[in-house]
Image (cartoon, rainbow, N blue to C red):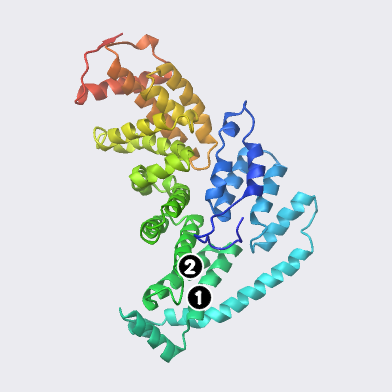
Amino acid sequence: MADAHVPHVAHPPSAEDILDGASGQADGPHNPAKQHSLLPKMIPHLDRHLVFPLIQFEEDQADEEEPPAELVQLKFELLKQTNMTDFVGDLDAQTQGLSERPAEYAQKREEVLQRRELFQEESSKLQDLLADPDVLNNLRSDKVANLNYLKENHGVTVEMVNTLYDFGQFQYSCGDYHSASELLYSFRILVNLLFTSTESTDNDKLSAATWGRLACEILTTNWESAMEEVQKVRENIDQRLFSNPLAQLQHRAWLIHWSLFPFFNHEPARETLTELFFSPTYINTIQTVCPWILRYLAAAVITNRNRNFGKNSGGQYQKQIKDLVRIVRQEGYEYSDPVTDFVRALYVDFDFEEAQKKLVEADEILRSDFFLVAAADAFKDSARHLISESYCKIHQRIDIRQVNPLLVLPLARGLLTLEQGSLQPPWSFAR
């Protein structure tokens, strides 16, 4: 895994040692949740700080008095290269069965504090200037003039600007995400105000600052700002890497995984990100690099039924269902789980008994998935209604006594929907 810095776009996070540990948790054919765990697949596409909440969720799901030893070891391997010395020291003590953290962590802590103090001294002048209204009022749209003004009047150098970036990385590695976000934001503002080319600060660093700020906004659950950063990262991928299709593919795969955090935690993000995932370039990325994302796309589309019902149910939502079915059918040989199997059983095979069976399994999967646990009830409710609606559309005569009791109410609503809507197949309701 790369050093614990703000993610650098040229070096994707790797986690061979972590993957080895996580793979063991995915075993167990008698446990659908573990059998279909996506943690090993997700780790290579996430920054180590973003992986930690997923591992913590796994630990909480274990429902044991003491956290499983393999998860403690996993967290230690994940964070041991960061500056979170106290926390890492406690994890190290746990893995070794010690009552207190090893002595070397006291020295590491002192080194981190000294480096933080040095960064604060080196960056304080520039941060004070950014907070000075008189200085900001003298900045113009002319970047060369801005740089000359700050150089001549305040002694600002390129190195000072880069120190903001380095300090942001440092604070991120310490787990101080609020401070890191502010530093990276200031760095990005200054770069855009002062530099006209890459001779002073390279584009990779500017791009990394955007990725880093996205991670910070996710980790501080600032979802609106995170969505703004998602858009910035997306534009950066399209513009900066337009001549490198392979790099674009890789970076889009990262963005897809990082976007899952606001996707399932911020309701206004659901529609925006569903459209993003269905766009040609991103659906191609999902199919080529990470077909397991179909679980999340399927869950998003199905739960969107409750939000779109009565508004776009006959238009955009039906198109999303159609696109989802097409992709699930195409990618069945690459990836499947109870969630995608539910879609296939309902809309490809029209096997309603199998669909109900897969719905039960999907519910267990969702309740064991970090991103989907909060959507489990909404998914079940929407899926039951989709079953009833599909059943009504293809049957001329329905005997409610033969219908699964769990579907009686959704079935009645499905009949009412068809009766009031534009679809009115010839059927009779046998009591």
Q: Earlier in the sequence, mark 1 or mark 2?
A: 1
Q: Which residue is mark 1?
A: 162
Pointers 1 and 2 in contact (C-beta within 8 Å): yes
Q: Find residue 380 and report its horizontal and vertical position in percent.
A: 43, 29
- Residue depicted at 36% across the width and 47% down the height: 281
Residue 356, given in percent of the width and then of the height, sits at: 44, 21
Could you classify mark 1 by the number of other residues whose Cα lies within 10 Å: few (under 14), some (14-19), or many (20 or more)? Answer: some
User: What kind of element bears circle 1?
Assistant: helix
In x, y percent, where is residue 234?
Answer: 38, 55
Amino acid at dot 1? Asn
The reply to whether residue 131 is in sight is no
The residue under label 2 is 205
Quarter that holds the N terminus: bottom right
Gap between marks 1 and 2, in whole Å?
9 Å
Where is 384 relative to 64, above or below?
Answer: above
Residue 157 picture location, percent across and down: 48, 83
Residue 386 visible at all = yes
The three-letter amino acid code for the residue at tag 2 is Lys
Closer to the camera, 87 or 297? 297
Q: Is residue 292 left or right of residue 349?
A: right
Horizontal placement of 91 versus 253: left or right? right
